Image: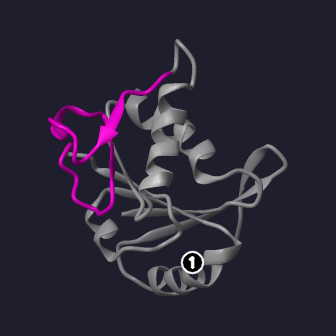
Amino acid sequence: MQVDFYQLSRDPAEAVIPGIASRILKDGGRLLVVSAERSQLDRISHTLWSAGPETYFANDHADAPMPEVQPILLACDCAPANGARHVALADGHWREEALSFDRAFYFFDGATIGEARTAWRTLSKADGITPRFWKQDGGKWRQGP
């Protein structure tokens, strides 16, 4: 199981998630995006829909009709009603349920860095988990130590 830690210093999660979603969908996968903040999920949805005519990404909230058909599902918990094997934790809060997926993307910023450090220390010692750290360097992502 792989957990990618993304330290947000320039762009918010809603600006980064479409790029990750693109790669997942290209490989035939599905994505669950989790945030306790409905307003953040709404912003992410808008960004996914408005990425451009060739690159918009169909998505909806878990409480909408037929969540199981959505390639990208937006939810307040880690229940993948769409069968997703990838989860993006957008609000900076680690959830142990993310470990039931094949891959987790954990976004955090300065306000949630303490929680991210705790999660990193715990997960880096756990068997079967490969944590990776990514940091924004200008407009690009660089893998850190």
- Residue at the location (75% across, 60% down)? 9
Residue in the picture at 71% in, 65% down? 144
**Residue at horizontal 35%, vertical 34%?**
59
Q: Which of the two residues, 104 or 115, is positioned nearer the viewer here? A: 115
Say if the magenta span includes residue 73.
Answer: yes
Front residue of 141/66: it is: 66
Q: Which residues are magenta?
A: 56-82
Quarter that holds the C terminus: bottom right
Task: Name the outermost residue toward the top.
Answer: 53
- Residue 33 part of the magenta-drawn span: no
Amino acid carrying label 1: it is Ala
Residue 29 in percent (x, y) is at 32, 37
Position of 9 compared to 18: left or right?
right
Q: Position of residue 97 (x, y in %)?
A: 28, 71
Q: Quadrant of the N terminus?
A: bottom left
Element under disc 1: helix
- Which of these two is toward me, 145 or 114? 114
- Residue at far right of view: 138
Considering every residue shown, the one lying at the far front of the view is 39
Return the residue at label 1: 116
Question: Picture coordinates of residue 37 (x, y %)?
Answer: 44, 61
